[in-house]
Image (spheres, rainbow, N blue to C red):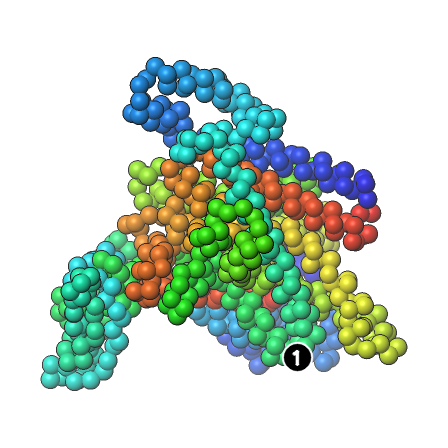
């Protein structure tokens, strides 16, 4: 940090930078009154001038863009959150729509060809056969039967975000009574694809809300710990060590099992989130504390203090903006662990409970070997968890590298 | 060294105290208290006079009608002084009878996994640092990341599915049926080891992933330092050079990570055991939580935490013994 950095500069770079600029590095030199970190140390003659005038967020973006895996992770993460936002449109059916004719129906594939005299999308029907001994139904895809399927077809009416009445679905059978199970059906003949998409919203939002609470606790306690140091710091560090030294899943189980069964699903959702974040804030607190420790002796903080700024103003205006990027990286690494925790609890049957649909709740169906041997497509929510967690880990890793000026 | 151990032991005491408070809170959390459940259960079962006396005796034993801190004191002093963890009302047996066997197996499983994690991540970590950006490095990193992203229970499920589908047998448990209740013997040990590898792999992947990355980063910090260049310039062979200097320096953080690997392993062991129905603490803990058998559940949570903290304590002392920088700080 250059000592010349003033209050207005910091505010400016933060405000301008929050929306990460998506444009390419400018080829022509731009007028920019922002300072560059450690500009004095750089061999100016050899450096491209554009680098020297770029703001902090622009530098981070350029560095991040070079990290291919992180870019891919970022794109997948954005896609998953896009799905979570437009759940009702993207899912062909409501999550609880069942059809007792088709329990454990295998996945169909989407075809393009002649159907009912027209060229279009279709899925094949099922031929059902009974095993006379076990009375078990087996489904075979019937190549002869073709059910037309359309994009933005009319299906079950719904309210988008509980507000806008709509009835179009991204993809749905023309005749709603025809089966369409692109990812197969579960034991009640419910569409796995629809349930998976609906589960996305709950699973991904629990990560976000949980991390928001963790972030609040982490920044507050980590900030206090790092800023004041001494006995306060020691106490908070002992609390963190304590929380880190106990096995989390048994503790989560103990707390989650105390949630009364009679509570409405929404309350259970918030309680679970609260439980997860009450134990999950420690990682963020450590990051914040570390940054506070390294920043509080910096010249620009001393300068701000000598200028007579209040403590709160020093923290909010001068210190926080210079580690926002680190916080964002830590957040993107904390969300996947929240998602995994929720999935594990719901899988055990003591987290979220039906009728709420989350990936963990869906995986509960896959708990015994016989049902997954019969219907391996019950694993799909598991695949979704793995993809989401991997993508966010890559994203977080890339962000962390990009935010670190020395890496 | 002695002063360090003493200081470390002193730090452990408040942690253990906090763990006991936390477990007590978990026992007290569910709405409706344990004794009313027990009373209604007993009333249903048989004549009331004998049971009223029994109930009153238990009420006095746990300080039922007294304030919470008295209850806490009676509970914790029973554990510390007499090894009395209370009564499991579902099994109608003392908790301590149910506890030790399963705790023992849980820790056997966790420590086997820890050894596995070390054995695997040590060579891979060194390799990917020395051959940075080679195919092997990328492969190791990738496998590590996948291990990190697949939740334990999912991996257990997939392994179960694969062995059921392709080998026609269901995996699970830690012993074959004929050995479940047998005494420990050579044959039982062999049988145990034959069952152990699946939970060990399931549990170990996540920790391995983390440790590979730590080992790699530590090695990368060391191998470009001047002392390594000097040693190389003096004509030391690459392998000897590697193991004589940078590996030894890089090893310390490797051991200190036991502090977070162990809680993760115990935590993961709980859920993996439920899926694979291992005779460890996991399934019994889940069952006791669902049936609100809180003395059993609370004791499990407490003892799992206590043993984890003690494991971490041992690893810290080991680390201080290995690394003078820590014991003289």
Horizontal side, residue A142 vs residue B300: left or right: left
Q: Chain of mark 1?
A: A
Quadrant occupied by the N terminus of chain A: bottom right
Residue shown at the point (67%, 38%) measured from the top left: B12
Quarter of image, res B228? bottom right
From this view, report whether residue B234 is shown above or below residue B179. below
Q: Residue B78: where, in percent of width, then height?
A: 56, 25
From this view, report whether residue A259 is shown above or below residue B142. above
Residue shown at the point (26%, 53%) measured from the top left: A162
Quadrant occupied by the C terminus of chain A: bottom right
Residue A203 in view of the camera: yes
Horizontal side, residue B207 vs residue A249: left or right: right
Q: Residue A369: where, in percent of width, then height?
A: 36, 59
Horizontal side, residue B41 vs residue B319: left or right: left
Residue shown at the point (60%, 40%) measured from the top left: B306
Q: Residue furthest right?
A: B234
From this view, report whether residue A294 is shown above or below residue A374. above
Q: Nearer the viewer, residue A68 or A51?
A: A68
Quarter of image, res A129? bottom left
Q: Pointer 1: what residue?
A: A48
Quarter of image, res B245? bottom right
Horizontal side, residue B235 vs residue A233: left or right: right
Q: Residues within 10 Å of mark 1 (few under 14, many from 20)?
A: few
Q: Secondary structure at mark 1?
A: loop
Q: Residue B99: where, in percent of width, then height?
A: 52, 38
Q: Residue A181: where, in percent of width, then height?
A: 24, 68
Residue shown at the point (72%, 80%) measured from the top left: A46
């Amino acid at each position: 940090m250059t000592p010349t950095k003033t209050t207005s500069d910091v505010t400016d770079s933060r405000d301008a930078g929050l929306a990460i600029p998506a444009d390419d590095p400018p080829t022509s030199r731009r007028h920019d009154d922002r300072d560059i970190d450690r500009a004095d140390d750089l061999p100016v003659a050899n450096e491209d001038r554009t680098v020297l005038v770029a703001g902090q967020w622009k530098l981070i973006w350029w560095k991040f863009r070079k990290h291919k895996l992180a870019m891919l992770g970022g794109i997948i993460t954005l896609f998953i959150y896009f799905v979570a936002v437009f759940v009702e449109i993207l899912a062909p059916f409501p999550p609880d729509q069942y059809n007792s004719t088709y329990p454990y129906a295998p996945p169909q594939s989407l075809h393009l060809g002649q159907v009912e005299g027209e060229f279009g999308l279709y899925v094949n029907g099922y031929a059902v056969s009974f095993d006379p001994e076990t009375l078990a139904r087996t489904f075979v895809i019937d190549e002869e039967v073709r059910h037309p399927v359309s994009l933005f077809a009319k299906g079950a009416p719904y309210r988008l975000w509980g507000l806008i009445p709509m009835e179009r679905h991204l993809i749905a059978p023309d005749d709603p009574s025809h089966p369409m199970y692109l990812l197969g059906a579960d034991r009640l003949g419910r569409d796995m694809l629809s349930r998976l998409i609906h589960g996305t919203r709950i699973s991904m939002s629990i990560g976000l809300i949980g991390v928001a609470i963790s972030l609040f606790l982490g920044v507050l306690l980590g900030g206090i710990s790092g800023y004041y140091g001494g006995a306060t710091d020691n106490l908070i560090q002992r609390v963190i060590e304590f929380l880190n030294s106990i096995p989390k899943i048994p503790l989560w189980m103990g707390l989650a099992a105390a949630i009364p069964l009679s509570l409405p699903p929404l309350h259970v959702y918030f309680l679970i989130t609260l439980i997860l974040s009450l134990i999950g804030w420690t990682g963020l607190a450590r990051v914040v504390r570390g940054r506070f420790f390294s920043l509080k002796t910096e010249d620009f903080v001393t300068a701000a203090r000598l200028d007579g700024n209040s403590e709160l103003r020093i923290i909010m205006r001068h210190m926080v903006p210079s580690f926002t990027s680190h916080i964002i990286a830590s957040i993107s690494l904390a969300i996947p662990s929240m998602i995994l925790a929720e999935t594990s609890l719901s899988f055990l049957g003591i987290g979220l409970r039906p009728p709420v649909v989350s990936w963990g709740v869906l995986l509960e169906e896959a708990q015994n070997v016989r049902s997954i041997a019969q219907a391996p497509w019950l694993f799909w929510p598991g695949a979704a968890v793995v993809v989401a967690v991997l993508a966010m880990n890559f994203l977080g890793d890339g962000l962390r590298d990009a935010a670190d000026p020395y890496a | 060294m002695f002063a360090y151990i003493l200081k470390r032991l002193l730090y452990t005491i408040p942690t253990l105290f906090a763990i006991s408070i936390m477990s007590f809170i978990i026992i007290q959390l569910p709405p409706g208290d344990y004794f009313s459940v027990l009373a209604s259960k007993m009333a249903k079962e048989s004549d009331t006079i004998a049971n009223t006396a029994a109930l009153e005796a238990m009420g006095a034993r746990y300080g039922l009608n007294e304030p919470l801190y008295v209850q806490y004191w009676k509970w914790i002093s029973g554990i510390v002084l007499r090894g009395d963890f209370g009564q499991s009302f579902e099994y109608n047996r003392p908790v301590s009878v149910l506890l030790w066997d399963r705790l023992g197996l849980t820790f056997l499983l966790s420590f086997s996994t820890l050894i596995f994690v070390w054995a695997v991540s040590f060579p891979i970590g060194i390799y990917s640092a020395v051959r940075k950006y080679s195919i092997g490095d990328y492969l190791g990193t990738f496998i590590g990341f996948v291990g990190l992203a697949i939740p334990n229970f999912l991996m257990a499920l997939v392994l179960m599915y694969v062995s059921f589908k392709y080998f026609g047998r269901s995996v699970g448990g830690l012993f074959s049926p004929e050995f479940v209740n047998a005494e420990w013997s050579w044959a039982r040990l062999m049988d145990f080891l034959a069952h152990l590898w699946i939970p060990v792999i399931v549990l170990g992947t996540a920790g391995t992933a983390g440790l590979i990355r730590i080992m790699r980063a530590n090695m990368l910090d060391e191998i470009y330092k001047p002392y390594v260049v000097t040693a190389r310039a003096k004509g030391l062979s690459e392998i000897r050079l590697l193991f004589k200097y940078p590996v030894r320096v890089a090893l310390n953080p490797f051991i200190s990570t036991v502090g977070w690997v162990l809680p993760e392993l115990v935590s993961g062991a709980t859920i993996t055991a439920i899926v694979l129905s291992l005779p460890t603490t996991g399934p019994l803990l889940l069952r006791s939580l669902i049936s609100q058998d809180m003395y059993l559940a609370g004791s499990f949570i407490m003892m799992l935490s206590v043993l984890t903290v003690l494991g971490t304590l041992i690893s810290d002392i080991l680390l201080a013994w290995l690394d003078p920088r820590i014991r003289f700080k």
